[in-house]
Image (tube, rainbow, N blue to C red):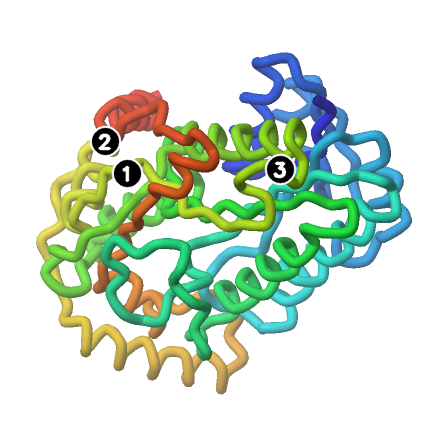
Amino acid sequence: MKVLVTGAGGFLGTAITKQLLERGDQVIAVQRSRYPHLDRMGVPCIPLDLTTDLPKIIDAVKGCDVVIHAAAKAGVWGPYESYRQANVQATNLLISACKQAGVRNMVYTSSPSVVFNGKDESGITEAAPYPEKYLTAYPQTKAKAEREALKANANGMVTTALRPHLIWGPGDHHLTPRILSRAKMGKLKLVGDGSNKVDSTYIDNAAHAHLLAADLIYKMGHQAPCAGKAYFISNDEPLTMRDLINRILKAGGQSPVTKTVSPTLAYIVGAIMEKWYLSRHIQTEPIMTRFVARQLSTDHWFDITAAKRDLGYKPIVSIDEGMKRLAEDLQL
C-alpha cells in the first residue's frame, strides 16, 4: 500500500512508519517540520500545516491507498482553541482533502479519554457514551474529532478509529520521562493508594493495531467489520497504578514510589492551580489538574473483545518483554 501518516515524526507515528516500511509498504510523512530520523529511514516528508493548508493536503494525499491520522495536540493544559484547531479542524480538513482527492480509507488515532467521565472505567466496552462534560480540552476535542472521523464513513470513504491507552516503550518522550523525572526530583506521588487498575499499551502493539485496521479497510472497504467503528486498544494486561509506575521506575534504575496523596486533596489542589494559572495567564502545565487527579486515582481498563474479533488484534509484545526492552533502551 501507499500510506500517508500524519504525525509520522512522533512516538506512535514513527512506530507505525517503521512497521509499514518493514513489510514493504510505501510511506509518506506529513509534519509541520522535518525530522532527521525520518530522513534516515528514507521517508519523504511533506511539511505543511494540517489546520490551514487544504490545497497542500489535497496534493499530499493524492494517490494514497490509506491515510493514518496519528497527529494531534496532546496534553492536559492550554487554550481550548489551540486543541480545537489541532485536533478537530485538522481532522476535518484531512477528511475533506481525502474526499476531494479520491482517497477512500482513513484510520484515525483516538484516545480512551474521549469517554472518560471522571469515574472508574472497569472493563468497559465501546458502548460507553461520550460524557456531557470534560475536565480539559484534549479529550473534548479528540471526542469531537473521533465523531467527525467516524461520520465520514460514508459517501465513498471508509474510516475507523483506534483508542490505544497509555502508550509506552523505547522512544517514549511523554509518560516514561515524566515518571522518571519526577521520581528523581522526589516529587512523584501516587494519587490514592495506587490499587486502581489501569491498562497500558506497548508501542509496537499500538502500531500493529493501526496496520491491522488499515489492511482491513483497504481490502474490504465498507464490508470491513471495523468500518465506522471505534476500538479500545491495550496490552490486555491491566496492572495496578502502583505496579505500572514501579515497573517503569525499575526499568529506569530507580526506587519504587512510596509517597501518596489523597484523591480528594489532589483534585482540590488541581482546581486551585488551574484557577491560579488561568488568572496569571501561565502557559506551562500545572503539576496537578482536576483531570490528572481523576485519571491517576480511578480504574482505566477496557474490554478489548471487539478489537480481537473485528481487527484480529492480539498484543505481539507482552508487558514483561516490553519492560525488558525499555530497560535496555534507558541504559543506552
Residue ID for mark 3: 223
Tell me if residue 278 comes above or below residue 194 in the rendering: below
Q: What element carries label 1?
A: loop
Tell me if residue 143 comes above or below residue 31 in the rendering: below
Is residue 6 in view from this perspective?
Answer: no
Between the residue at mark 3 and the residue at mark 2, the CA separation in whole angstroms equals: 43 Å
Of circles 1 and 2, the one toward us is 1
Amino acid marked by disc 3? Gln
Residue ID for mark 2: 251
Quadrant housing the N terminus: top right
Residue 236 marker: 1
Of circles 1 and 3, the one toward us is 3
- Please give left or right for residue 53 compared with residue 160 in the image: right
Amino acid marked by disc 2? Ala
Q: Position of residue 92 (x, y in %)?
A: 73, 58
Label 2 packing within 10 angstroms: few (<14), some (14-19), many (20+): many
Of circles 3 and 2, the one toward us is 3
Q: Where is residue 215 in the image (x, y as percent from the top left)?
A: 60, 27
